[in-house]
């Protein structure tokens, strides 16, 4: 599944491989307060490596609490405002 996710993401983003600047927010969660554990929910974080190779500034968080998630979103929002492209995972 993670290879499919990574290859799909990179396929869609490869058209923008020549972009000088990009920003990506990746949130991977396996644990939730009110839900059962999501097996391998943070595998999506592996997409970040490919995005960095494509020139993206990656903001990634695994099992983040509300405060950490808000900070990651704020940081991503600032970078995305000036980026040529952005992506959310």
Image: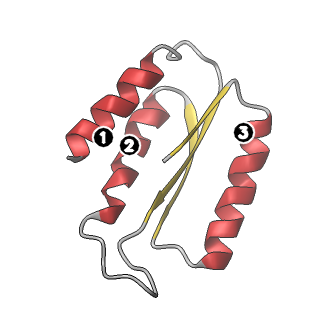
| Label 3: which secondary element | helix
On screen, 35 above or below 52?
A: below
Look at the numbered discs 1 and 2 and tell me whether their residues touch, using CB distance below 8 Å: yes
Residue 55 as seen in the image, left or right of residue 35: right
Q: Is residue 15 above or below residue 84?
A: above
Where 30 sits versus 57, above or below?
below
- Name the residue carrying label 1: 5
**Horizontal side, residue 23 vs residue 75: left or right:** left
Q: Along the polypeptide, which appears first: circle 3 or circle 1?
A: 1
**Quick one: SS at disc 1?**
helix
Per the image, the residue denoted by label 2 is: 47
Query: Residue at point 63% right, 73% down?
Result: 68
Q: What residue is shown at x 39% (from left), y 53% (from top)?
A: 45
Point 72% across, 39% down: residue: 80
- Mark 3 neighbour density, 10 Å: few (under 14) some (14–19) many (20 or more): some
Expressed as whole percent of the image width and height from the top left, the position of residue 27 reads 49, 59
Position of residue 18 relative to residue 26, above or below, is above
Give the CA separation, mark 1 to mark 2: 8 Å
At numbered mark 2, what does the secondary structure look like: helix, strand or loop?
A: helix
Q: Which of the 4 image quarters holds residue 66?
A: bottom right
Q: Position of residue 89 (x, y in %)?
A: 48, 48
N-terminal-most mark, 1 or 2: 1
Q: Are the residues at dot 3 and dot 2 in contact (C-beta closer than 8 Å)?
A: no
Q: Residues within 10 Å of mark 2 (few under 14, many from 20)?
A: many
Residue drawn at point x = 68 percent, y = 49 percent: 76
Q: Position of residue 52 (x, y in %)?
A: 48, 36
Alpha-carbon distance for marks 3 and 1? Answer: 22 Å
Q: CA distance from mark 3 to mark 2?
A: 18 Å
Q: Where residue 80 is drawn, which disc sits there? A: 3
């Amino acid at each position: 599944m993670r290879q499919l996710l990574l290859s799909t993401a990179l396929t869609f983003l490869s058209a923008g491989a020549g972009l000088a600047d990009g920003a990506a927010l990746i949130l991977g969660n396996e644990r939730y307060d009110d839900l059962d554990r999501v097996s391998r929910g943070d595998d999506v974080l592996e997409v970040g490596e490919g995005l960095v190779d494509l020139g993206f500034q990656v903001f990634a968080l695994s099992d983040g609490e509300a405060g950490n998630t808000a900070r990651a979103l704020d940081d991503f929002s600032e970078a995305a405002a000036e980026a040529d492209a952005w992506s959310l995972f």
